[in-house]
Amino acid sequence: MKSLRNLIFVVLVSLPLTAYAELPWQLSQHTRYMALGDSLAAGYGAVPAAQGYAYQLYASGVFDTVPNTLLSNAGIPGTTSRDILEHQLPQAIKALREREAVQPTFITLLIGGNDLLQILNGADPNQVLTDFQLNLTEILGTLRAALPHTRIYVGNLYTIPQIPGADDIVPVFNDIIAGVADAFDVPWANVYKEFLGKKDYLLINRRGADQFEVHPSNAGHRAIARAFRAVIE
């Protein structure tokens, strides 16, 4: 499964580069945006997936005009913070170093939901939280070192009250995200606040939804995009 996810990642990262390969003299004139993360970054829950928050940020013009913005969406469903550290990040940095002209101007990172699910599925909370903090620290440290001029933004997690334990553990994840982001002077988007009390933002509230449906609706993706815009603008 990880091999498949890695292949998808390489294809997604390469798409904009291939599209503009015939016009290399124009690449340095464009703003580049890369979305790192899990299924949320990939647009899961939105219908169509192109209504996902990363695509909404791109289309909103928050980074630059749409014709002057190149999007690389590297979101892969099922990704944990460890997966980003061991797979997404090395592949992204390798690809970007090989194509210096297309290093991203902006990166958004939204991660932690699948780490959270490990706890909700019975994993030791202390171990998962410790690993998450270490992974996020290394992720941001690596990005800062490899891409010193790139503007990086991190989103925190929304809670899902219908899932037992989520309301207690999500704030702990968010404290870690805020602490690590602040240590690297990385602005963090308060997705958690945007979702509070908004039932229509969560697919779990739809009739017939799975009891562990964790993805946001179209309205939820708009809320995530709104939270990121608040710290980008």
Image (cartoon, rainbow, N blue to C red):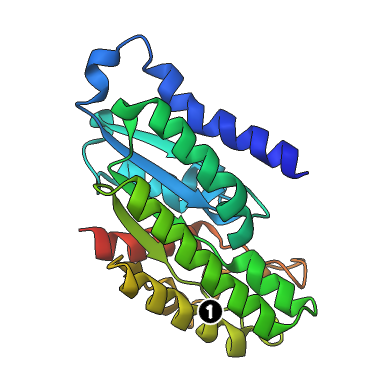
Quarter where residue 112 is shown:
bottom right
Q: Is residue 41 above or below residue 223?
A: above
Point out residue 178 in the picture as x, y percentages from the top left corner.
Answer: 39, 77
Residue at 38% from the left image edge and 25% from the top image edge: 99
Q: Is residue 226 visible?
A: yes
Q: How many marks?
A: 1
Q: Which residue is mark 1?
A: 173
Q: Position of residue 136 (x, y in %)?
A: 49, 66
* Identity of the residue drawn at 32% across and 28% down: 100
In the image, what residue occupies the spot 58% across and 61% down?
81
Q: Quadrant of residue 115?
A: bottom right
As shown in the figure, which amino acid type bears the numbered disc 1?
Phe
* Image quarter (top left, top right, bottom left or bottom right) of the N terminus: top right
Q: Residue furthest top?
A: 22
Percent across and percent down for residue 30 are 24, 29
Figure check: 176 above or below 230: below
Quadrant where the image shows the C terminus: bottom left
Q: Secondary structure at mark 1?
A: helix
| As drawn, 175 above or below 99 | below
Position of residue 226 relative to residue 76, above or below, is below
Q: Quadrant of residue 105?
A: top left
The residue at the point 73 percent across, 44 percent down is 2
